Image (cartoon, rainbow, N blue to C red):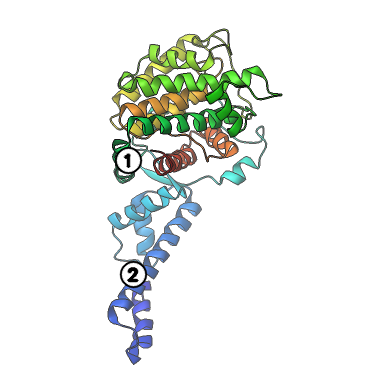
């Protein structure tokens, strides 16, 4: 007897006194079956480590879910993907599903104990196709429509105020991710009154003020980033690093990253080629949200500059969002440690699932908090 047949049998016994309506019985059965199917799929993926849709469908058929179609399995897998419990690997017929990494378990190991991809992956570009499925992008577009409607209602004075608020909060959080010790109130005073906080290094104030300069630029020139070039990328980096580094051009030597044994490219020609390939990928991508995600993640991965790579990635991501009439992010509520973990996980495993979740959450929050 299958799981569904067993449930119907039990419900017929319970329903003899007519206290449970047939429609409620069917809803109950449907809910229980979906939950059991979901649990079975997750359990199977975890046990097998890597499985295809066909293998999952066959497994379910032998586990009491005889009428479960591949379409139903795909729908359950989409749910597991959105919850970051499984990851999809490969394309088309070669697609398989693997259990998602346990973040806490992964980072419980010291960096020298983790088995990682320690060098730049030249095939990484294949992983950047279809990061977000059609449903996810549609959900984001629906949320973004609220941003567009809200922004259209603002007077010029109110819009200026909202942009100032986002500038303060992004300048503070982006700098804090990089170790800056300014508080949000210190940052507000610095940006509004040009007054540095007592006991803080001048470099910290410069970092924040440079964020403001870069943000003022992308807010004023939204159409400028509809098509990305290497010159535009370097312009953003120069604004962010003004007075902080002597060389704002492309990196010519090796660079190490605290907290990971991942080693970015160190040959200047290869660095430039990687940046040009990234620009090609971004310009070839139609969705602004996807463009921004790729930019933020890959500028960090390539590390094209001596310093300020993550900052440049975050500001470039917002420039691409604004160019596509999408809401910019402030990252205000993101936990700095979790943000760094998500980036390191991509460095070491080329796994973007955790960063995808954080990025999406921050976008949704930006739409609800600004404009």
Q: Residue at x 58, y 31 (%)?
A: 177
Q: Residue furthest bottom?
A: 17
Left or right of 255 on screen, residue 272: left
Q: Residue at x 35, y 73 (%)?
A: 29
Quarter the C terminus occupies: top left
Task: Report helix, strand or loop for mark 1.
Answer: helix
Left or right of 125 on screen, residue 246: right
Left or right of 256 on screen, residue 14: left
Asked whether 223 or 6 is in front, the reply is 223
Residue 317 in sight in this render: yes
Point out residue 109 in the picture as x, y percentages from the top left corner.
66, 40
Give the mark count: 2
Circle 1: is it few (<14), some (14-19), or many (20+) Cα within 10 Å? some
Left or right of 22 on screen, residue 160: right
Asked whether 67 or 27 is in front, the reply is 27
Point out residue 25 in the picture as x, y percentages from the top left corner.
33, 78
Asked whether 280 or 218 is in front, the reply is 218
Point out residue 125 in the picture as x, y percentages from the top left corner.
39, 27
**Which residue is under mark 1?**
150
Q: Earlier in the sequence, mark 1 or mark 2?
A: 2
Task: Report helix, strand or loop for mark 2.
Answer: helix
Between tags 1 and 2, which lies in front?
1
Q: Residue at x 50, y 54 (%)?
A: 47
Quarter the N terminus occupies: bottom left
Q: Residue at x 47, y 50 (%)?
A: 85
Tell me the number on the disc at residue 132: none
Residue 117 in sight in this render: no
Tell me the number on the disc at residue 30: 2
Point out residue 206 in the picture as x, y percentages from the top left corner.
58, 18
Measure how far apart labels 1 and 2 are at the Cα level: 39 Å
Compared with 319, 89 (above or below) is below
């Amino acid at each position: 007897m299958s799981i569904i047949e067993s449930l119907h049998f039990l419900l017929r016994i319970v329903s003899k006194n007519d206290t449970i309506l047939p429609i409620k019985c069917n809803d109950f059965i449907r809910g229980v079956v979906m939950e059991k199917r979901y649990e079975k799929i997750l359990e199977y993926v975890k046990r097998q480590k890597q499985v295809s849709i066909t293998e999952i469908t066959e497994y379910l058929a032998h586990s009491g879910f005889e009428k479960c179609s591949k379409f139903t399995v795909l729908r359950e897998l989409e749910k597991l993907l959105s919850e970051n419990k499984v990851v999809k690997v490969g394309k088309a017929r070669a697609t398989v599903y693997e259990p998602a990494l346990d973040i806490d378990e992964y980072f419980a190991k010291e960096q020298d104990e983790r088995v990682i991809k320690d060098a730049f992956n030249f095939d990484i570009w294949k992983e950047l196709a279809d990061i977000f499925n059609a449903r996810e992008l549609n959900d984001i577009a629906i949320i973004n429509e609220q941003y567009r409607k809200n922004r259209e209602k603002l007077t010029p004075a109110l819009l200026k105020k909202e942009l100032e608020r986002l500038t303060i909060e992004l300048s503070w959080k982006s700098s804090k991710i990089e170790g800056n010790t300014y508080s949000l109130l210190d940052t507000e005073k610095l940006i509004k009154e040009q007054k540095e906080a007592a006991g803080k290094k001048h470099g910290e104030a410069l970092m924040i003020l440079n964020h403001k300069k870069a943000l003022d630029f992308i807010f004023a020139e939204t159409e400028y980033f509809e098509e990305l070039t290497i010159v535009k990328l370097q312009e953003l980096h120069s604004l962010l690093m003004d007075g902080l580094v002597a060389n704002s051009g492309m990196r010519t030597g090796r660079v190490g990253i605290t907290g990971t044994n991942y080693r970015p490219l160190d040959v200047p020609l290869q660095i430039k080629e990687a940046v040009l390939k990234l620009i090609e990928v971004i310009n070839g991508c139609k969705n602004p949200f996807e463009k921004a995600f790729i930019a933020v993640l890959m500028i960090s991965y390539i590390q094209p500059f001596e310093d300020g790579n993550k900052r440049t990635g975050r500001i470039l991501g917002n420039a691409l969002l604004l160019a596509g009439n999408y809401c910019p992010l402030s990252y205000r509520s993101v936990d700095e440690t979790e943000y760094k973990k998500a980036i390191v996980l991509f460095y070491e495993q080329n796994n973007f699932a955790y960063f995808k979740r954080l990025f999406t959450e921050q976008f949704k929050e930006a739409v609800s908090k600004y404009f």
